[in-house]
Image: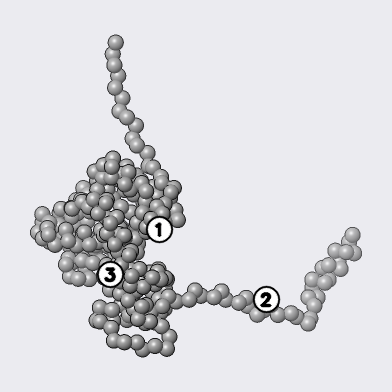
Amino acid sequence: MTTVRTSPPPRLPIRDTAQGAAGGASPMLGRLADERATGVLIRERGTLYLADGEVVHAESPATPGLDVLFSVHGVLDPEVWREAVATAGARRSVGRFLIDSGRIAEGALELCHLGSLYDAAYFVLGPSSTPSRFRYGAAHWFGPLRPVPVAALERETVRRRELLHRIWPDPATDTAPLRRAPGTTGPAVPFRQEAVLGRVDGVRTAADVSLALGRPAFHTLVDLRRLAAAGLVTAAPEPQPLPPPSVLTQTSADPDVALLRRLRDALEAL
């Protein structure tokens, strides 16, 4: 008798509808680490890429990308970054290409990438109101450099959350548009905080300030919470809805003659 072997079907994306009560971390993340999974965890505020159960990359709309951090601080010319993505992106080895081609030292790139990873992961692992999803087999075009164990990432996320709470317990300045506190000049602030304060205009959020300065977003949150604790920055109030145009609310002393005539004609036709 001939035995026929068939390949197992590909694993489908899985979803996690329960959100962690302690710190908002995804309950599925530990399970993915235990099974040494490779793929991408998609959450409300960003994504984590895993390889063999460890985190190799993180992205969030709340944080500047590596390209912004490199460009603002003069680490890499934007044209060099675009060349690396075009050359090695399809092979998912942009980081390795930058090192092997001599564009940046390995240690410097690892340090920048780890800082960006932890920065984005802080937001990805925050409280979420939507289910998490995991797609097996997905890989990021940057490629792995120095994987981070899930347990270490979660510990650092909790440490950062507790640090912010100690500085100023109100998280409103983390996400809302920001304004300077009215009627206060306040004490002199360090140069780093002064640069943040200079971007506060009643419209920008913490993420906008980070992007404008080319700084890690978590560092900006720390500065903003310290400015809030000093009474210099507050969350801007939500805009009030505009009243309806006066033409819609004013009453007219003159009847709509045409409407009255149409009503009369309709009644007469009955």
> Where does label 3 land, which residue?
219
> Where does label 2 land, which residue?
248
For image coordinates 38% across by 79% down, the residue present is 233
Quarter of the image with the C terminus is: bottom right
Identify which residue, 204 or 160, lies in the foreground: 160
3D distance between C-alphas at marks 1 and 3: 19 Å
The first of marks 1 and 3 along the sequence is 1
Query: Could you tell whether 45 is left or right of 137 in the image?
Result: right
Direction top: furthest residue:
1
The label shown at residue 127 is 1
The first of marks 2 and 3 along the sequence is 3
Instruction: Please tell me in which quadrant of the rendered image residue 209 appears.
Output: bottom left
Mark 3 surroundings: few (<14), some (14-19) or many (≥20) residues within 10 A? few
For image coordinates 28% across by 79% down, the residue present is 193
For the residue labelled by badge 1, is the local secondary structure a helix, a strand or a loop? loop
Instruction: Please tell me in which quadrant of the rendered image residue 269 appears.
Output: bottom right
Amino acid identity at mark 2:
Leu
How far across and down, in percent of the image, does residue 87 sit? 19, 53
3D distance between C-alphas at marks 1 and 2: 43 Å
Amino acid identity at mark 1:
Pro
For the residue labelled by badge 2, is the local secondary structure a helix, a strand or a loop? helix
How far across and down, in percent of the image, does residue 248 sit? 67, 76
